[in-house]
Image: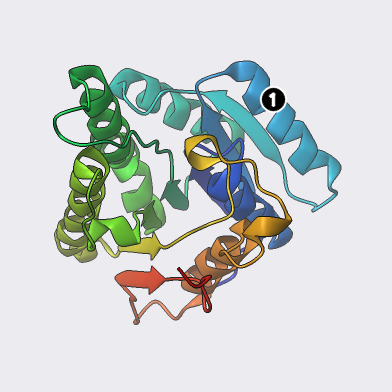
Amino acid sequence: MKLEGKTALITGGTKGIGFGVAESLMAQGINVGITGRNQVDCDKAAKKLNDAGYGARAIGLKADVRNFESQEAAVKRLLEAFGSIDFVIANAGLGHFGSVEEISLDQWNQVIDTNLTGVFYTLKASVEALKKSKGYYITISSLAGTNFFAGGSAYNASKFGVTGFTQAAMLDLRKHEIKVSTIMPGSVATHFNGNEPDESDAWKIQIEDIGELVVDLLKMHPRTLPSKIEVRPTVPPSK
């Protein structure tokens, strides 16, 4: 597929995996709209991307995936800026961890509303644009979407849900020639859960690795669909 001149919407694109994906897509000549809940952060990230000189354009869009109207507005602004939406990467997410006895109702709702309902809202808001472009919808799930662990009730529930939702959406939308995939990373060197990436994270998947994987998916022949991709560090540290 010729990628230059296409347009992508990336939720949670101001840092971490979303920003790494934006860098990789812009290097292919793809214009991007990156969303976040703070316009200042969106503008800073977009400026950094534009200053890198990729030859494509980035715009920052204040939007909260937990609010459907907010997602609709982001889609509308991106369409006004570039005319079409060819790719959507549903990446925005957060985590609260603790025993089911400890996790609060508010923490549970934040995780489910952001990680799972936000993925649905993002697709619901963009599906008509993707039908027109015969586009690609990619969710960022997690290995936690198939491997449960103590203290992960909310996060596991959200990511198991994302994995299942994405696979069902793939079956629903293939008749429109929309491709749908989920990427399920293990440990990634990001700011997730308060982490500050440094040399100690060198063993982890890097954000550019996920970006490269997204590009590989977009370049794959339209007849072939890797619908669920697990990816993990090659050599994690010994426990």
Give residue 93's position: percent from left, percent from top. Answer: 40, 38
**60 shown above or below 181:** above
Give residue 212's position: percent from left, percent from top. Answer: 59, 68
Residue found at the very far front of the displayed protein:
239
Note whether residue 84 is visible: no
The residue located at (49%, 68%) in the rendering is 218
**90 shown above or below 42:** below
Which corner quadrant holds the C terminus?
bottom left
User: Residue 142 occupies which quadrant of the picture?
Assistant: bottom left
Number of residues whose C-alpha sits closer than 10 Å to that of mark 1, classed few (under 14), some (14–19) or many (20 or more): many
SS under mark 1: helix
| Amino acid type, mark 1 | Asp
The residue located at (50%, 41%) in the rendering is 192
Q: Which residue is mark 1?
A: 43
Seen in the image, is 140 located left or right of residue 160? right
The residue located at (31%, 25%) in the rendering is 66
Seen in the image, is 203 located left or right of residue 70? right
User: Residue 76 occupies which quadrant of the picture?
Assistant: top left
Colour style of the rendered protein structure: rainbow
Give residue 26's position: percent from left, percent from top. Answer: 69, 54
Note whether residue 126 is visible: yes
User: Residue 215 occupies which quadrant of the picture?
Assistant: bottom right
**14 shown above or below 148:** above
Along the line of sight, the residue nearer the viewer: 66 or 123? 66
**130 shown above or below 105:** below
Along the line of sight, the residue nearer the viewer: 128 or 151? 151
Along the line of sight, the residue nearer the viewer: 124 or 153? 153
Q: How many marks?
A: 1
Give residue 221's position: percent from left, percent from top. Answer: 44, 81
